[in-house]
Amino acid sequence: MIKRKLEQYIEKRMFSGKAILLFGPRQTGKTTLLEHLLSKRSEKALVLSGDEPDVREFLPHATSTYLKNLIGKNQIIFIDGAQRIPDIGLVIKLITDKIKHAQVVATGSSALELAGHTKEHLTGRKYEYFLYPFSFAELAGHYGLLEEKRNLEHRLIYGCYPEIVCSNGDEKELLKLLTSSYLYKDLLMLDQIKKPLLLENLLKALALQVGSEVSFNELSQLVGANKDTVTKYIDLLEKVFVIFRLPALRRNARNELKKSRKIYFYDNGIRNAVIGDFKPIALRNDAGALWENFVISERMKYIAYENIEAGCYFWRTTQQQEIDYVEESDGIFHAFEFKWKNTGKAKISKTFTRNYPNNTFDIITPENYQTFLEP
């Protein structure tokens, strides 16, 4: 089993008087992670699944007395697929407040679903964690750095979902199934999604613009929808961990872009499945975009798992001066350019250094990217 970074953090929070909520996309290994964690512990555990109709029926109406009888001497209450259970936030609150010997651990497939059900009731009563597809650090820790670097082109094309990483030649078929169920079926079950074809066209448009600035006005014209609808759908796609946006850094220079943003996919395989392109790197004209999406999404995992406080941006001026990625921490601006082929020509903009004098600059290539993605 590939060890997950979050395991150590969740273990430290067990029996600290708060519920533990584990969010993340479907098929990232949330259930597997918690089952592994429970298998190492000596406490008795009660496992409840939101897939079970009777659990969805009786749990929302349970009183604290009923819950005490249900839980009995069990010390860990594992609620899998908790977002499917109505009023689950109130249930977890009752257990946390009234049954002091019990530790609640719950999973949810999206922040939109589970967080919406728990936010009001669990303020100050929960620890939240987010599990993404395998990170570079997790895979390098399991396979070894040399072997994982050898797998780089495979990761750029097929991504890092556990089922894909552990498959044996079935990556295309599995990604198509994953995309169909995870992106379309699950998202279309949300009340906010009224136009399935629009969602599909929007995802394709975003996939084709990875690494480029995204204009919501242009997207709305491209997919034939108003800007408010496009903005709403993009917000939903962020909440279910399909995509994330990177804003423009704008502090000092008048000519810095004000309201621009880039949008990336959390997983390269999902991005390629959306556009149906699994050609090898040598036959593609988007290798640079794939490389940029990979290293930035991996950096987001690294920041989340290492609990790093940092502002994340790209930088560009109206004169087309630009930097792929800027990370601000402790008053220092760390600037990065991402080059699939290292020509050694990238230089930091003088406009940037003049306006942000406390800076560092690095070029990230396939030769040195491990320094950007490992603690």
Image (cartoon, rainbow, N blue to C red):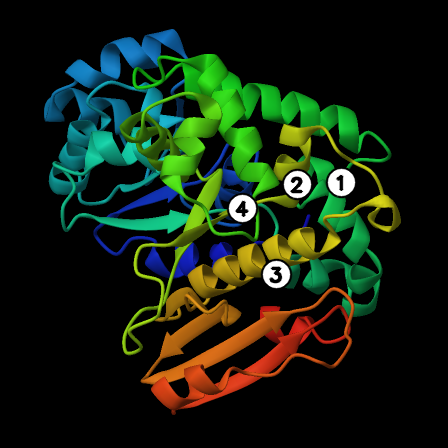
Tell me whether the residue at label 4 lies in contact with that at label 3, contact meaning CB atoms closer than 8 angstroms: no
Q: In the rendered image, which residue does mark 3 sit on?
A: 295
The quarter holding residue 146 reads: bottom right
Question: Which of these two is toward me, 373 or 270?
Answer: 270
Q: In the rendered image, which residue does mark 4 sit on?
A: 266
State the mark number for residue 162. 2
Tell me whether the residue at label 1 lies in contact with that at label 2, contact meaning CB atoms closer than 8 angstroms: yes
Q: Earlier in the sequence, mark 4 or mark 3?
A: 4
Tell me whether the residue at label 2 lies in contact with that at label 4, contact meaning CB atoms closer than 8 angstroms: no
Instruction: Classify mark 1: helix, strand or loop.
Output: loop
Under mark 2, the amino acid is: Pro
Q: Residue 115: percent from the left, percent from the top?
A: 27, 36
Q: Is 256 on the left or on the right of 137, as rendered?
A: left
Up-down: is 322 above or below 192?
below
Q: Earlier in the sequence, mark 4 or mark 1?
A: 1
Question: Which of these two is toward me, 375 or 264?
Answer: 264
Q: How far apart are the alpha carbons under marks 1 and 3? A: 21 Å
Q: Earlier in the sequence, mark 2 or mark 4?
A: 2
Q: How far apart are the alpha carbons under marks 4 and 3? A: 10 Å
Q: How far apart are the alpha carbons under marks 1 and 2? A: 6 Å
Q: Residue 235: percent from the left, percent from the top?
A: 34, 36
Which mark is in front, 1 or 3? 3
Q: In the rendered image, which residue does mark 1 sit on?
A: 166
Visible residue check, residue 51? no
Q: Residue 150: percent from the left, percent from the top?
A: 84, 60
Which mark is in front, 4 or 1? 4
